[in-house]
Amino acid sequence: MGTLVKNELFKLRKKSSTWIMILLMFVIMLLGPILTILSGSEVMSYTAISSAGALWLVVTLISSAGSILSMEYEYGTIKELFASKYSRGKILISKWFTIFIYSIILNILLVVYTGIIYYAGRLLTTNMSFTWSENAISGETVTTMTESFLRMLASDFINAWLVISVVFLLASIIKKSSLAVTLGLVFFLTSSMISSLLSSLMKLTNLDWLKYTPFNMLFLNFNESTASLEKVAHLNATQLGIGSLIYIIIFLIIGLLFYRRKEV
């Protein structure tokens, strides 16, 4: 298993698109402060900088998760993998671990990029106020800000993996990487709208079971108060977190079952 993961990480590292996406994440995060300065605004928040990067991070992982499976079929290398001593299950699980490691690396880069842009902005601009968030509490300590940031990262990480697990499921069924990635992006881009529609529907009807759907789990935010979350998602953060993890496991297992029966 370790050898498979090393091979997958090597292939990921050798892909030019990997480095392009990482560079683009920094550029996209940098655009926010630049546009804010040009617009004449006097406030730039730490969370606003990281949020732009977090969105691109998910797009990057969707692209990588979709292609890491389907491209083996497109280039015919899947036959060599299946002919090796490793089972289909181990091959797929190694790809899960590869994307998991990649997601951790991207999150570390997100923190580093945010810190660089945030503190560079404070040093280079004199007429702009840099805060933790748009709704920052006066006198908020570094400890509480750090805790808030870590909770935000945890929420985004779980939400990202809920989407990635769906992409892995799609890629386990579909042989074309472009189609798997496209469907994954459609799911991600429409999930927020669908979640909002479900929230409105739950308020207007007695369809209480809707709160247990995967789309509703995407409301997860460990920084939101219980009252705020229950108002829109009808579940608290702990329930949403557990529900998301359950769905991630379910989607990955279903994908594994399809992958084992997938024709070469």
Image (tube, grey):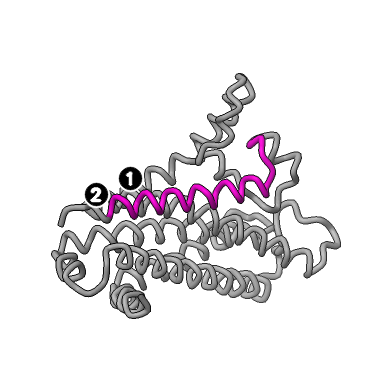
Q: Quadrant of residue 85?
A: bottom left
The residue that disc 1 covers is 183
Q: Classify residue 143 as left or right of residue 120.
A: right
**Disc 1 packing (10 Å; few <14; some 14–19; many ≥20):** some
Please provide percent x and percent y for residue 73. 18, 60
Percent x, y of residue 121: 63, 70
In which quadrant of the rendered image does the N terminus lie? Answer: bottom left
Q: Position of residue 39 (x, y in %)?
A: 59, 54
Residue located 48% across and 52% down the image: 248
Q: Residue at x 66, y 35 (%)?
A: 234
Residue count near mark 2 (Cα–Cα under 10 Å), binned few <14, some 14–19, many ≥20: some
Nearer to me, 102 or 57: 102
Q: What's the CA distance linking mark 1 and mark 2? A: 10 Å
- Position of residue 225 measured from the top left corner of the image (x, y, whole percent): 75, 46
Cβ atoms at labels 1 and 2 below 8 Å apart: yes
Total marks shown come to: 2
Residue situated in front as seen by the camera: 212 or 87: 87
Secondary element at tag 1: helix
Residue farthest toward the top in the current orientation of the protein: 205
Q: Secondary structure at mark 2?
A: loop
The residue stretch that appears in magenta: 232-259
In reply to whether residue 249 is colored magenta, the answer given is: yes
Q: Give the number of the mark in front: 1 or 2.
A: 2
Q: Is residue 213 magenta?
A: no
- Near-viewer residue (257 or 115): 257
For badge 2, the amino acid type reads Ile
* Picture residue at 69% right of the left edge, 58% below the top: 43
* Residue topped by disc 2: 174
Quarter of the figure that contains the C terminus: bottom left
- Badge 1 amino acid: Leu
Dominant SS of magenta comes to helix
